[in-house]
Image (spheres, grey):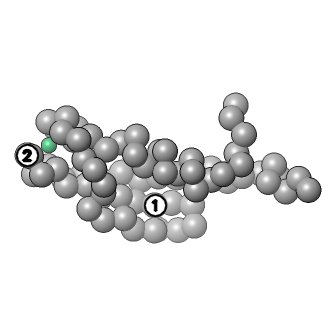
């Protein structure tokens, strides 16, 4: 299990892991819209330039237990 030292970095990796159109497999550079639903949930709205397909992905950040609390 990887250490949870940088949540922001992890979120970015998760985001850019889902940047291809599920319909035509075109590469999507960035989400058209990102909405912060809560502290631990972000919803991205994607729009494909090639086929016009639109879809949403939700990113949930795992609650870091007491690991980050270590001093
Ligand atoms: Zn597409």
> Is residue 39 left or right of 15 when viewed as pictured?
right
Residue at (18, 39) in percent of width and height: 26
Residue at (40, 40) in percent of width and height: 17
The furthest residue to the top: 1
Local secondary structure at mark 1: strand
> Is residue 69 left or right of 27 when viewed as pictured?
right
Q: Residues within 10 Å of mark 2 (few under 14, many from 20)?
A: few
Q: How many marks?
A: 2
**34 w.r.t. 18: above or below:** below
Q: Which mark is residue 2?
A: none
Residue 66: x, y in percent?
82, 52
| Quadrant of the rendered image containing residue 3 | top right
For the C terminus, the quadrant is bottom right
Q: Quadrant of ligand 1?
A: top left
The furthest residue to the right: 71
Q: Which mark is residue 51?
A: 2
Q: Earlier in the sequence, mark 2 or mark 1?
A: 1
The verdict on label 2 being within 8 Å of ligand 1 is yes
Q: Which residue is mark 1?
A: 42
Tell me if label 2 and label 1 are in contact, CB under 8 Å: no
- Separation of marks 2 and 1 at Cα, in angstroms: 25 Å
Q: Residues within 10 Å of mark 1 (few under 14, many from 20)?
A: some
Residue at (57, 47) in percent of width and height: 10
């Amino acid at each position: 299990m990887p250490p949870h030292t940088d949540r922001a970095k992890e979120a970015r990796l998760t985001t850019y892991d889902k940047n291809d159109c599920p319909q035509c497999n075109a590469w999507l550079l960035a989400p058209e819209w990102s909405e912060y639903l809560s502290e631990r949930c972000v919803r991205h709205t994607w729009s494909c330039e090639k086929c016009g397909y639109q879809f949403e992905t939700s990113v949930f950040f795992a609650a870091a237990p007491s690991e980050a609390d270590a001093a």
